[in-house]
Amino acid sequence: MTQTQERKEIRSSTPKPPQGWKQLKWYGPGLMWMISSVGSGSVLFTPRVGSRYGYEYLWALLIVILFMWVMIREVGRYTVVTGKTILDGYRDLPGPKNWAIWLIFVPQIVAAVVTIAGIGALAGSALMLAFPGNQAIYATALIVLSAILVISGQYQRVEQAASVMAGLLIVAVIVAAIQVFPEWGEFTGGLVPGIGDDFDLEFLLPWLGFILAGAAGIMWFSYWVAAREYGGPVEGDLENDETSNRNGSQDWEDEDLQQRRRDRLKKWLRVMSTTAAIGVVGGGLVIIAFLILGAELLRPEGIIPEGIRVAEDLTTLLSEVWGEFGYWLLLGSIAIALGGTIVANQDGWPRMFADATLILKGGSRNSEDESTESGVKGWLKSALGDRDRLKNIYVVITVTLLPLIVFFLVRDPVDILEVGGIVAAAHQPVVAFLTLYLNQTKLPEELKPGWFSSTLMVLSGLFFTIVAILYFAIEFFGFEF
């Protein structure tokens, strides 16, 4: 390996990793990622699966949770080691220019539009039970007001309040699941892999795709790691950052300093890996709790939540345990937590789309081109070279206007979110294989994933590839089991 190659594959400097009790503050934010990942389609689809199948597919849930842990850890690995987001890494893959960026960019736009439309519809169906008015009014208000908050930059307090309510929802769901926990034999029977007579992949696929936010959650983890500076701050476009290269030049000439940096990064990787595990295990427990509530409370009543009044069906999850208090607790928590999820999604997806656009047009991630032309054409050229303005354009178009159009065309949260879950499930093997190839070919030997992680990445990619192929065989060619 030449020095030039290595310079592209490892960040120019890294601070000392936290030790002892100081590591706790780095683990805590993993819970925030957990809250944002659970507040997607899992709130809707997991009780539906529990109601229809009981614990029959608990084994599939645990497998996906394991795969999600290794996938988010691997996108985090690239960011920790290189100081770049995973999109910057995909840009540098060999082959036709930016082919991997397009593979990520287009499906995620579809996922963003339908996910926000579906979550808005679900939150609206909850609010119309608590206040006068209909679903359309509340869904529209949530999507538009959260977009205004994101563009104005005044959404931090809303996110904090929503995170508190989401945390309350999580605690309530886990406590309620413990209260109605079934016999161990019934529960553990779901650990044995198998496909029953009532197997319906079209019903199960959105659930599998939304577990821990699916492909979107994987991509967000790279940005989350970068924003919280695991391993050090983001270094931008390292190939064009002369300051970064100049400041690190002595390090590249000194083998001892190179080794010290690699040793520090190994410790940062352990911190990041533990954080990922905390988020995934916590999120997994919440999803299992929703599965238990669906199996124990909805299944005996024959209730499978659906339609524009889906939130009314979901209130059964707590109202049968705690009466009217449980009804209002779940209703309020769903409305506020999902409202916060809309805000987080409207901020996160446009950031990724803005970065992808700058990469595709040939600029760096931090590009700020100023056009000298006047009028709309000049404004457009200038906006396409400025990350913040690009982000706001995507906020208005892809996560506000388009979701509203989808919502008014469909209205049913289940029908809308099913599309998002299917896109997420089909997209996961793309993310898994691209990330594995990137880490194996671009990172220094000492910092590459080991055989265990690499094997799990391959298995996760194959698992979702097989699931996607089966789904399209059923949907388009009438394949039956």
Image (spheres, rainbow, N blue to C red):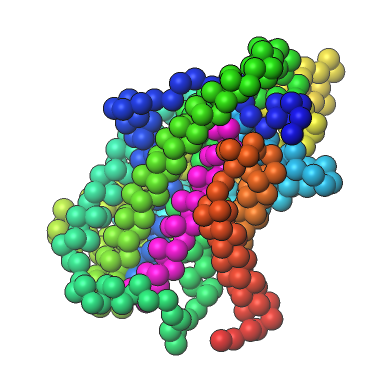
Return the x and y of residue 461 as percentages of the image width and height. Answer: 60, 60
Residue nearest the observer in this picture, 50 or 402: 50
Q: Residue at x 73, y 39 (%)?
A: 91
Number of labels in the image equals 0
Bounds of the magenta span?
Answer: 52-81
Whether 53 is drawn above or below 461: the answer is below
Left or right: where does residue 371 sit relative to residue 386?
right
In magenta stretch: residue 54: yes
Q: Can the viewer see residue 362 in this picture?
A: yes
Quadrant housing residue 89: top right
What secondary structure prevails in the magenta region? Answer: helix
Q: Quadrant of the C terminus?
A: bottom right
Return the x and y of residue 132 as percentages of the image width and height. Answer: 32, 50
Quadrant housing residue 314: bottom left
Q: Can the viewer see residue 305 in this picture?
A: no
Return the x and y of residue 210 as percentages of the image width and height. Answer: 48, 57
Q: Residue at x 32, y 65 (%)?
A: 291
Residue nearest the observer in this picture, 116 or 79: 79
Q: Quadrant of the N terminus?
A: top right
Whether 162 is drawn above or below 247: the answer is below
Q: Residue at x 69, y 39 (%)?
A: 442
Left or right: where does residue 371 sit relative to residue 88?
right
Whether 236 is drawn above or below 289: the answer is above
Left or right: where does residue 76 sit relative to residue 308?
right
Residue nearest the observer in this picture, 468 or 131: 468
Whether 366 is drawn above or below 292: the answer is above
Q: Residue at x 55, y 33 (%)?
A: 80
In magenta stretch: residue 393: no
Return the x and y of residue 20 as percentages of the image width and height. Answer: 31, 27
